Image (cartoon, grey):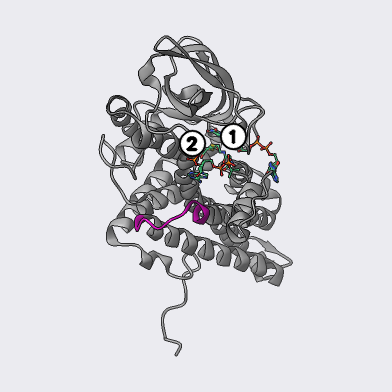
Amino acid sequence: MATTAARPDPRDFLDIAQLLTPEETMLRDTVRKFVTDRVLPNIAEWFEQGILPRELAQEVGRLGLLGMHLEGYGCAGGSAVDYGIACMELEAGDSGLRSMVSVQGSLAMYPIWAFGSEEQKSEWLPAMAAGEAIGCFGLTEPDSGSDPASMRTHARRDGSDWIINGTKMWISNGSVADVAVVWARTDDGIRGFVVPTDTPGFSAPDIGGKLSLRASHTSELVLDDVRLPAEAVLPGVASMRGPLSCLNEARYGIAWGSMGAARACYESALSYATEREQFGRPIASFQLTQRKLVEMMVAINRGLLVAHHIGRMKDAGNLAPQHVSFAKFDNVRAALHIAREARSVLGANGITLEYPVMRHMNNLESVYTYEGTNEIHTLILGHAITGIQAFS
Ligand code: TGC
Ligand code: FAD
């Protein structure tokens, strides 16, 4: 029987907030306030200049958001849902900010935490959790994107040392990193190396001309006879399972984060549509506009339910990589579609940095491609349901 409950909130139609515990609600509000006070007033300028100030890492570190789902070594030891909520609120500000936090926590700290030696963990994790040391993750290469197992970067032994040669491409945080987790081919399989970025032979030139994720540093990593001691290798893994395990962590955060970007676009379109008048009426009064707004609202609520569901599964230890692919595949494509529709609602104003929509839309083009393209996640899901591998 229908109840007499109040009219649904257009900004939380299915009352998804009620799924959060009081502690999760507090975390959401804290990160939202940080984004509102510190990021939103500046992000258009950072995006235009192509920068993300380094001190933001220390600021989010003080909020306990770096490596927040890891235990010990100065990390906050939060739940998977906590981590998802933080990603969502950060990405409502900008995907570049969420990327910085994802790369730090899921791609640079996680492999050290999961596969590193005690010495590597003690040396790097507390400083990285505080944002005093920034990390990056070097997997992709100029000729190895969707197929990272074809990487050419290699490490060979020289006495007890390792010598690494190769080039990594499209590396977030690269030019501002203090430490790079670099994956390389060796005689023992694919190994991860913890590379201090001041090691001779290492350089990280920025990639220019980006129209997407401009508030994020994206770099090449050049390793030219980089000599490392024996203890630089991550001892706990010697196969593609190493880097792919890190991707599960980051893709999980993106499933939530993309819904933050989508929410920002939807809210911007909703408020614009109720204020902007054409033909003597608010554009929100036209059926075609209402349809766009309704499709956005429904897709966001659906994506958030998926994010919450996989979050609880992850916390219960029941989340498979294919579940993460489901959420990354569907939530990011939905967010990109929402951003494009929102841009059309704003008309010409939608193409400017005065509104967040086109900035999010351009960012989401990268989010659609990184951490496994939409096509790769389609094939992971296709493999899962048919048992037939169609990558190659
Ligand atoms: P395959 O032969 O199937 O497996 C090789 C080994 O890996 C294991 N494995 C996994 N382990 C953990 N998690 C997963 N998701 C795993 N998938 C596979 C597997 O069990 C096996 O282990 P072992 O011990 O038996 O050797 O793997 P494949 O090489 O055929 O890969 C298949 C494919 C295409 C799915 C994979 O290569 C892939 O996901 N490609 C996409 C590449 C990608 O996502 N790159 C992302 C780079 S980082 C980035 O974009 C950062 S963006 C910045 C930000 O996040 O903000
Ligand atoms: P390709 O693999 O060349 O793919 C091109 C097209 O072909 C895509 O549409 C793809 O889906 C399609 N395709 C490829 N193979 C198949 C197939 N078997 N079947 C069907 N279609 C296929 N990498 C890192 O290691 N660390 C980082 O920090 C990082 N940060 C990034 C930041 C940004 C802003 C961007 C844009 C990328 C970043 N990446 C990073 C790289 C990212 O992971 C790769 O761009 C991504 O994996 C795709 O590789 P590619 O660009 O070489 O495209």
Asked whether the beta carbons under mark 2 and mark 1 sit within 8 Å of each other, the answer is yes
Dot 2 corresponds to which residue?
243
Task: Find the distance from the CA under tag 2 to the CA under tag 1.
Answer: 9 Å
Q: How crowded is mark 2: few (under 14 residues within 10 Å), some or many (20 or more)?
A: many
Dot 1 corresponds to which residue?
148
For mark 2, give the secondary structure.
helix
In the picture, measured across the screen, residue 313 lies left or right of residue 385, that is left
Coordinates of residue 211 in the picture (x, y in percent): 65, 35
Residue under the image location 54 percent in, 34 percent down: 215
* Nearer the observer, 9 or 177: 177
In the picture, measured across the screen, residue 139 lies left or right of residue 159, that is right
The C terminus - image quarter: top right
In the picture, measured across the screen, residue 33 lies left or right of residue 200, that is left
Ligand 2: image quarter: top right
For mark 1, give the secondary structure.
helix
* Nearer the observer, 354 or 70: 70
Coordinates of residue 242 in the picture (x, y in percent): 46, 36
Residue 289: image quadrant is bottom right
In the picture, measured across the screen, residue 272 lies left or right of residue 236, that is right
The CB of the residue at mark 1 lies under 8 Å from ligand 1: yes
Residue under the image location 45 percent in, 51 percent down: 88
Q: Is residue 235 visible?
A: yes
Coordinates of residue 147 in the picture (x, y in percent): 62, 37
Q: Give the range drawn in magenta.
A: 315-324
